[in-house]
Amino acid sequence: MNRKSIITLSVVAAGMVVSAIILLFAFSIRVPEEPSAAAPMYSIREYQGQLAIFEQGQETPLRIIDMDIALLPLYDQALLQSGIDAADEQELRRLLEDYTS
């Protein structure tokens, strides 16, 4: 083998090593995933004509708010019939404030 062939093979081998290292890092670096939406903790629904707070999955209200939902706009009444989920207590407070103020 002549000197020119050895240099060419060395450059190609070095390029392959660099490419392999780049690919190794590219596949080992993880892109942070978006946080998965946690299951909601609470649901605000209509209960016997009143506004009520339910823990997720429960049929008995955690708390009943003395507020006649018939006084709300029809759109809000429809939402409350199916339930409005709240991920945590902060969101629950915000939703209750919207409906009771």
Image (cartoon, rainbow, N blue to C red):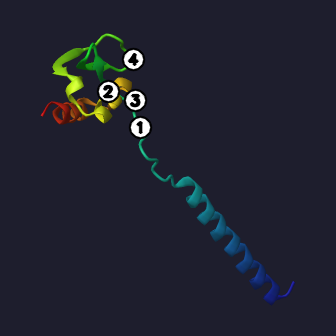
Q: How crowded is mark 1: few (under 14 residues within 10 Å), some or many (20 or more)?
A: few
User: In the structure shown, which secondary structural element does the residue marked by tag 3 occupy?
Assistant: loop
Q: In this view, does 52 lie above or below 89?
A: above
Query: Quick one: label 3, few (<14), some, or many (20+) residues within 10 Å?
Result: few
The reply to whether callout 4 and callout 3 are in contact (CB within 8 Å) is: no
Seen at 23% across and 24% down, the residue is: 70
Q: Whole-Å distance between the Cαs marked 2 and 3?
A: 19 Å
Mark 2 vs 4, N-terminal side: 4
- The C terminus lies in quadrant: top left
Task: Report the mark closest to the observer, 4 or 3.
Answer: 4
Q: Which mark is residue 39?
A: 3
Q: Which residue does the numbered mark 1 point to in the structure image?
A: 37
Spatial separation of the CA atoms under disc 4 and disc 3: 11 Å
Q: Nearer the viewer, residue 23 or 34?
A: 34
Q: Which amino acid does label 3 sit on?
A: Ala
Of mark 4 and mark 3, the one earlier in the sequence is: 3
Give whichever of discs 1 and 4 has the lower sequence position: 1
Look at discs 2 and 4 and give the one toward the viewer: 2
Q: Which amino acid does label 1 sit on?
A: Ala
Q: Which residue lies furthest to the right in this view?
A: 1
Q: Residue at x 32, y 27 (%)?
A: 80
Tell me which corner region of the image, top left, top right, bottom left or bottom right, holds residue 44. Answer: top left
Mark 1 or mark 2, which has the lower sequence index? 1
Q: Is residue 36 above or below residue 89?
A: below
Which residue has dot 4 on it? 57
